[in-house]
Amino acid sequence: MPERGEDGTGVRTDGHWSDHAACRAADPEELFADGAGQNRSKAICFGCPVRTECLAHALDTRVEHGVWGGMTERERRALLRRRPTVTSWRRLLDTARQEHRAHIVRVAGPGARLPEAS
Ligand code: SF4
């Protein structure tokens, strides 16, 4: 999720993954919207190649506002309450992604088209 940058682009600069964000050129006002605006933000996230990294960052750093990784602040709070023992969402989500990719290869074979890894 971009934050309003000094250059007005709204692009975060706290990690390389944000360079590939689907919302890189989006209006921060739209991305921090409420209600229906959040659904529009989430729609952008669903096609984002760095969704996992974005969500992990928001969960690991307890970002309180906005849609990050396709989840609203309310959804992230609920997830954090359900999983209070997770110490690194980045590690947990990376592991889940690797296991998912391995499962696809097991089921579809070594030539399977895999989800992008960033
Ligand atoms: S997952 Fe959504 S909020 Fe995060 S970088 Fe991608 S488009 Fe932006």
Image (cartoon, rainbow, N blue to C red):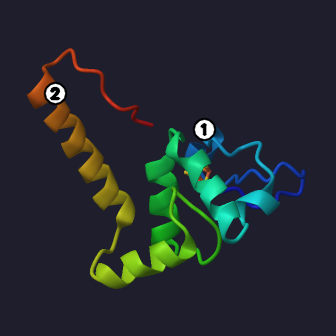
For the residue labelled by badge 2, is the local secondary structure a helix, a strand or a loop? helix
Is residue 47 placed above or below 94 in the rendered structure? above
- Looking at the image, which residue is at 75% across and 50% down? 11
Q: In terms of depth relative to the viewer, which is nearer, 110 or 7? A: 110
Residue 31: % across, % down:
71, 59
Above or below, 64 relative to 30: below
Pick the front one: 89 or 33: 33
Q: Position of residue 74 (x, y in %)?
A: 52, 78
Total residue callouts: 2
Task: Tell which residue pokes out farthest to the top in this image.
Answer: 111
Q: For the N terminus, give its image quadrant.
A: bottom right
Which mark is in front, 2 or 1? 2
Q: Which mark is residue 105?
A: 2
Q: Earlier in the sequence, mark 2 or mark 1?
A: 1
In this rendered view, identify the residue nearer to me: 43 or 49: 43
Residue shown at 70%/52% (left/top)? 13
The residue carrying mark 2 has its beta carbon less than 8 Å from ligand 1:
no
* Kind of residue indicated by mark 1: His
Nearer to me, 94 or 82: 82
User: Which residue position is annotated with label 1?
Assistant: 20
